[in-house]
Image (cartoon, coloured by chain):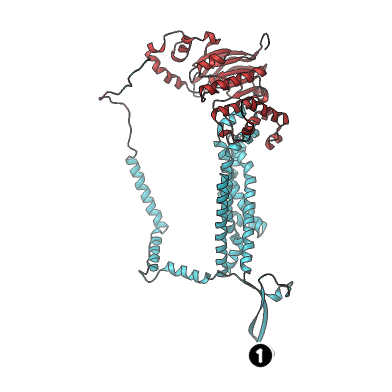
């Protein structure tokens, strides 16, 4: 058996190696430049005023100073928005098919008397007439309307996601550099993906409303097209980064590109695909409430209408509904994810 | 076996220069007859993997000709040739998140139409064959639906072997199939490979690092070094002196053992620099 001592370097040995400190003057200069940039941009975006006003507001709330613009503004909004409107009342005479003996659930007929003064053109005197109007009062009527609109929003989000997934799968194939048939298809697919992703949903929806009219079609298309760009990019990059070993095994026996993609790439990237799609669904849900603002259907359209009519009570109901919906769906998707992983 | 086995794999003057100018293979000539278990030995970077990958065209040689079972390797014949040549890989190369069954069946993909492949609707004979080979390599029916990545290394290589035999190959290329397995499992795996190949009278070209296994399983040993074949003979002819020369001495023919040759310490670094294989 051969045993040799492990060599130890002699005490006066000097190696021709260098192990530098992690920071140098160069890094200090960069840090100073970044600081200057922060100060300049902060000034331009009024960050100093934001800080002052917020401090003032906090001071007002704890009773240190008497007045704060921020607190006053928020107070006004809160006053006009509270309480949220839950009920609806519609003139019975206008509801043609109303059967007074068989009213909808939880609704009742109420009569309101309105006093009107009208100028009699013959006598040129003001006459006072009292009109009795029967209204159908539904105590939860507006909640019901909002619920229906929320369901419509959910449907827009679901169809937008479905459209995005079905568009992005072929896009991803062409946009993955190792599977795209040739350089031209790759460039076109990448360009298309960048184009789709670069335009925000809200702006796409604005144009689509012009093309398809008000309603959910524009919403579904806007969400689907934008998300297709997003998913296409991420699906394609996952294909490119997938483990090369199983692909090589199928290449070695002469299986074609599509078969290799299906048997050696798809199983490996599927969990990531599910995660991306779940994120897009989540994002589409939130965006679907927003794109209604430009008339693309769903709860946003209702919100915009009420906001423009200064019905702040209704706006409050809608905002609460949106919060509850997003919260509940978050919980559900978290449960599903936990079960899948 | 035939009385006079015909040549199955023929490599004529294969050379490979990588784009960076490294010479990975230097005009290698090799003829492997039908049914032979041919082991390739040599230090890392000797060009063993590159040579194997030349046989099925995974690596395009810069010069020379490849001929397998009478088909010359050209871009036009590549697909037909690859159907005859199976490959077993060092890292098993399974789709680890797919089931064992899907991995084995994927070995039959060239014989399945695209529509069937996308639906996973393989022919009943192919399903039967997949089960047959999985049983043959020592797996159990309840392994079928498990993910390939859940299996141990040895079991994964068994799946790799089952996959390789799905197309009844004429040639099986094994690129360090047991490099990451323990000695007992390595022996079992190579025995499986040898027996399965014998049943089909398939030729096996197998690169190895374990000299004892090479002597045990090889009908023939080819020693490679710096992109050239430096030994070609039976296991009996491959004695200790030749082994030492293959791995430790730069100059073939200078037969000094390692302990008396202090410069040999520097050798591995030089060979690592060859890279590429």
- Residue at numbered disc 1: A124
The residue furthest left is A12
Q: Chain A hue?
A: cyan
Residue A129: in magenta span: no
Q: Give percent across and percent down for residue A329.
A: 57, 55
Q: Give percent across and percent down for residue B51.
A: 56, 19
Label 1: which secondary element: loop
The chain containing the residue under callout 1 comes to A
Circle 1 crowding by C-alpha within 10 Å: few under 14, some 14–19, many from 20: few
Q: Give percent across and percent down for residue A15.
A: 30, 26
Q: Chain B hue?
A: red
Q: Main secondary structure of the magenta part?
A: loop
Q: Is residue A9 left or right of residue B40?
A: left
Quadrant of res A176: top right
Compared with B187, A79 (above or below) is below
Compare residues A183 and B46 and report the one nearer the observer.
B46
Quadrant of res A242: top right
* Highlighted range, magenta: A9-16
The answer to whether any part of residue B124 appears in the image is yes
Residue A13: in magenta span: yes
Compared with B229, A81 (above or below) is below
Compare residues A137 and B148 and report the one nearer the observer.
B148
Q: Give percent across and percent down for residue B73.
A: 64, 20
Q: Is residue B43 left or right of residue B38?
A: left
């Amino acid at each position: 058996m051969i045993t040799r001592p492990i060599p130890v370097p002699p005490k006066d040995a000097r190696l021709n190696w260098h192990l530098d400190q992690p920071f140098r003057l160069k890094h200090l200069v960069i840090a100073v430049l970044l600081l200057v940039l922060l100060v300049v941009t902060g000034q331009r975006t009024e960050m100093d005023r934001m800080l002052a006003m917020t401090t003032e507001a906090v001071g007002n709330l704890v009773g240190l100073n008497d007045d704060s613009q921020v607190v006053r503004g928020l107070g006004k909004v809160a006053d006009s928005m509270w309480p949220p409107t839950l009920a609806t009342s519609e003139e019975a005479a206008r509801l043609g098919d109303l059967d007074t003996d068989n009213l909808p659930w939880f609704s009742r007929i109420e009569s309101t008397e309105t006093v009107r003064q009208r100028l009699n053109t013959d006598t040129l005197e003001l006459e006072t007439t009292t009109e009795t109007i029967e209204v159908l009062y539904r105590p939860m009527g507006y909640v019901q309307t909002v619920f229906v609109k929320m369901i419509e929003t959910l449907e827009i989000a679901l169809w937008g996601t479905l459209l995005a997934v079905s568009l992005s799968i072929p896009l991803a194939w062409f946009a993955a550099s190792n599977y795209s048939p040739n350089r031209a298809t790759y460039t076109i697919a990448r360009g298309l993906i960048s184009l789709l992703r670069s335009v925000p949903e809200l702006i796409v929806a604005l144009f689509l409303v012009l093309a398809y009219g008000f309603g959910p079609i524009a919403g579904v298309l806007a969400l689907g097209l934008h998300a297709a760009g997003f998913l296409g990019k991420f699906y394609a990059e996952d294909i490119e980064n997938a483990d090369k070993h199983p692909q090589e095994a199928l290449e070695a026996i002469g299986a074609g590109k599509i078969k290799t993609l299906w048997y050696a790439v798809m199983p490996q990237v599927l969990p990531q695909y599910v995660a991306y799609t779940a994120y897009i669904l989540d994002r589409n849900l939130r965006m679907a409430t927003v794109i209604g603002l430009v008339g693309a259907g769903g709860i946003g359209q209702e919100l915009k209408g009420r906001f423009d009519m200064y019905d702040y009570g209704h706006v409050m109901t809608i905002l609460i509904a949106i919060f509850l919906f997003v919260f509940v769906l978050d919980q559900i998707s978290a449960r599903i994810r936990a079960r899948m992983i | 076996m035939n009385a006079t086995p015909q040549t199955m794999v023929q490599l004529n003057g294969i050379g490979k220069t990588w784009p960076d100018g490294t010479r990975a293979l230097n005009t290698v000539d090799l003829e492997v007859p039908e049914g032979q278990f041919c082991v390739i030995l040599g230090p890392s970077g000797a060009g063993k993997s590159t040579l194997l990958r030349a046989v099925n065209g995974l690596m395009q040689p810069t010069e020379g000709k490849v001929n397998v079972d009478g088909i010359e390797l050209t871009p036009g014949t590549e697909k037909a040739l690859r159907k005859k040549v199976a490959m077993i890989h060092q890292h098993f190369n399974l789709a680890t998140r797919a089931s064992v069954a899907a991995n084995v069946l994927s070995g039959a993909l060239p014989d399945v139409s695209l529509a069937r492949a996308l639906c996973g609707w393989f022919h009943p004979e192919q399903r039967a064959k997949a089960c047959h080979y999985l049983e043959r390599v020592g797996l159990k029916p309840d392994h079928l639906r498990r993910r390939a990545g859940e299996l141990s290394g040895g079991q994964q290589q068994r799946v790799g072997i089952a996959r390789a035999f799905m197309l009844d190959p004429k040639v099986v290329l094994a690129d360090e199939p047991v490099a990451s397995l323990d000695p007992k499992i390595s022996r079992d795996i190579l025995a499986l490979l040898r027996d399965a190949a014998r049943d089909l009278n398939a030729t096996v070209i197998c690169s190895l690092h374990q000299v004892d296994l090479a002597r045990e399983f090889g009908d023939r040993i080819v020693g490679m070094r710096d992109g050239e074949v430096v030994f070609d003979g039976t296991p009996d002819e491959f004695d200790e002196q030749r082994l030492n020369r293959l791995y430790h001495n730069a100059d073939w023919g200078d037969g000094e053992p390692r302990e008396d040759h202090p410069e040999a310490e520097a050798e591995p670094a030089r060979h690592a620099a060859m890279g590429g294989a």
